[in-house]
Image (cartoon, rainbow, N blue to C red):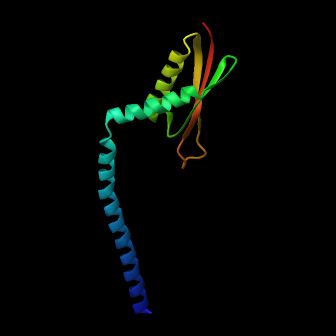
Amino acid sequence: MKNQRGFNLIKLLIVVGGLAIIAIIGSLISPIKSREAANLSSETVATAVHTTVTNAVDSAETVGNNTYIIIWQHGMPHNQRQLILETMRAFEESHPGLEVLDWRVETKQADYTNRKFIYGLWVHHRPQ
């Protein structure tokens, strides 16, 4: 019986040691991925945002004085602020005859463990 407890303790230490090694390797790899992501040029990011904005504004649906612009992006609105603001700017430039009265970001967060998802923008406007 005593040997069985000692054997279980050894197995437990092996499992904990293995998990510690996995955690250490993960922490070493994580900065490498961050550096790779940071190496994206601002030109690449700007091109991606411009393409997304152009597609979003082109596919906007307007009924009366309301327009819905599809964004369809994972993340929190404050992390997607450039995309959201560029979309609003592009909408205003492509509709010079409209005065934007108000706009809202449509998001959803199912629970605390899920990230937010940005569905689109509701834009309320009137003719100038």
Q: Where, by quadrant of the figure, is residue 17 drawn? A: bottom left
Which residue appears farthest toward the top when viewing the image?
Answer: 128
Q: Quadrant of the C terminus?
A: top right
Q: Residue at x 60, y 26 (%)?
A: 60
Picture layout, residue 105 above or below residue 2: above
Q: Position of residue 61 (x, y in %)?
A: 64, 26
Picture layout, residue 113 above or below residue 107: below
Picture layout, residue 57 above or below residue 93: below
Q: Position of residue 82 (x, y in %)?
A: 44, 29
Q: Residue at x 31, y 36 (%)?
A: 41
Question: Closest to the observer: 51 or 70?
Answer: 51
Q: Residue at x 48, y 20 (%)?
A: 89
Q: Residue at x 58, y 15 (%)?
A: 100
Q: Position of residue 43 (x, y in %)?
A: 34, 32
Q: Position of residue 23 (x, y in %)?
A: 35, 63
Q: Quadrant of the N terminus?
A: bottom left
Question: Closest to the observer: 53 or 7?
Answer: 53
Q: Position of 80 compared to 29: left or right? A: right
Q: Position of 64 compared to 89: left or right? A: right
